[in-house]
């Protein structure tokens, strides 16, 4: 059953990134710069707060959100509206304004691709305020040098070096195919949960059916329409009715098996899970 309003809403602050990771689909998209306008972000936050106060906002997508010149102002606006923030960062931005936001998120994952990112992620944990309730995760991609250098240190530590969980992901794409990995998958295809609960808005106001498909659709721009209008539109209904269409068919993210592995703290023990 499709949710009356999405429960996870991506509001991309910028597709810009300071890194050039080899597996990243940024190499295959046209939109590589620009920033979401403050007015658009606040308009969407106001709608989310009005329609579904329990929704989670993910202020990132194809780039590094901390590069947005108003990163702290915009995310703080969503927090002040009582909304939950789940954030991902590569750990290269540690100014006071960034850390202030980090410690207010419900969930924060540091996606590690460089030694500096790893060092800064550790520093965030070391400097964490006593009253901070953020769930902190550190994540790696299995093909990268930083993974072989740091993953064992993290998962072998009795407290996961202070993080609540560790994630090891498969490569994001193979040959630039959005949502496609090298994993063999013999599971029976099920309806993709992203089409039930997730809505993605790009920095220029267009939308995508899914965070794994990085090319946006141009039928609607959220500067002129509401999330609810697009969510309930015939365009989205056609995507759901025709699933998997030519864009969704090549994707293998729907089964969850490409999520890799996790190590997390549960009742003072470390639980290892393979997805």
Image (cartoon, helix red, strand yellow):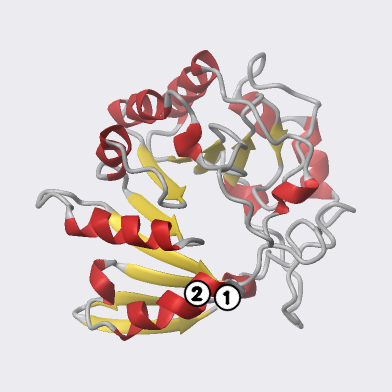
Nearer to me, 87 or 95: 95
Q: Residue at x 57, y 33 (%)?
A: 14
Label 2, on which residue? 147
- Count of numbered circles in the view: 2
Is residue 66 left or right of 164 when viewed as pictured? Answer: right
Looking at the rendered structure, the secondary structure element under dot 2 is helix
Mark 2–mark 1 CB contact (< 8 Å): yes
Label 2: how many Cα within 10 Å (few below 14, some 14–19, many 20+): some
> What percent of the width, then of the height, locates residue 140?
50, 68
> What percent of the width, then of the height, locates residue 73?
36, 23
Q: Is residue 262 visible?
A: no
Using the image, determine if residue 226 lies above or below residue 188: above
Label 1, on which residue? 142
Q: Residue at x 71, y 39 (%)?
A: 208
- Residue farthest to the left, as pictured: 130
> What percent of the width, then of the height, locates residue 29?
77, 43
Nearer to me, 103 or 184: 103
- Residue farthest to the front, as pictured: 115
Q: Residue at x 33, y 55 (%)?
A: 120
Q: CA distance from mark 2 to mark 1?
A: 6 Å
């Amino acid at each position: 059953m499709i949710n009356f309003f999405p429960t996870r809403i991506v509001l991309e602050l910028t597709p810009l990134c300071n890194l050039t990771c080899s597996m990243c689909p940024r190499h295959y998209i046209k939109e590589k710069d620009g920033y979401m306008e403050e007015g658009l972000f606040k308009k969407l936050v106001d709608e989310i707060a009005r329609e579904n106060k329990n929704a989670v906002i993910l202020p990132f997508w194809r780039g590094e959100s901390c590069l947005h010149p108003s990163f702290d102002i915009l995310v703080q606006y969503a927090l002040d509206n009582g909304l939950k923030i789940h954030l991902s960062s590569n750990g290269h931005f540690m100014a006071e304004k960034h850390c202030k936001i980090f410690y207010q998120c419900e969930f924060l994952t540091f996606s590690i691709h460089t030694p500096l990112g790893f060092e800064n992620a550790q520093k965030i944990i070391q400097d964490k305020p006593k009253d901070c309730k953020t769930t902190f995760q550190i994540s790696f991609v299995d093909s990268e040098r930083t993974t072989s250098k740091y993953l064992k240190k993290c998962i072998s530590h009795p407290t996961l070096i202070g993080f609540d969980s560790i994630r090891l992901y498969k490569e994001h794409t193979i040959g630039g195919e959005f949502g496609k990995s090298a994993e063999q998958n013999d599971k029976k295809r099920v309806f993709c949960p992203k089409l039930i609960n997730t809505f993605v808005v790009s920095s220029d106001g267009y939308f995508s059916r899914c965070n794994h498909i990085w090319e946006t659709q141009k039928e609607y721009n959220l500067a002129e329409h509401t999330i609810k209008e697009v969510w309930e539109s015939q365009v989205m209904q056609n995507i759901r009715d025709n699933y998997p269409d030519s864009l969704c068919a090549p994707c293998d993210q729907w089964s969850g098996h490409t999520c890799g592995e996790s190590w997390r703290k549960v009742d003072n023990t470390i639980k290892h899970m393979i997805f």
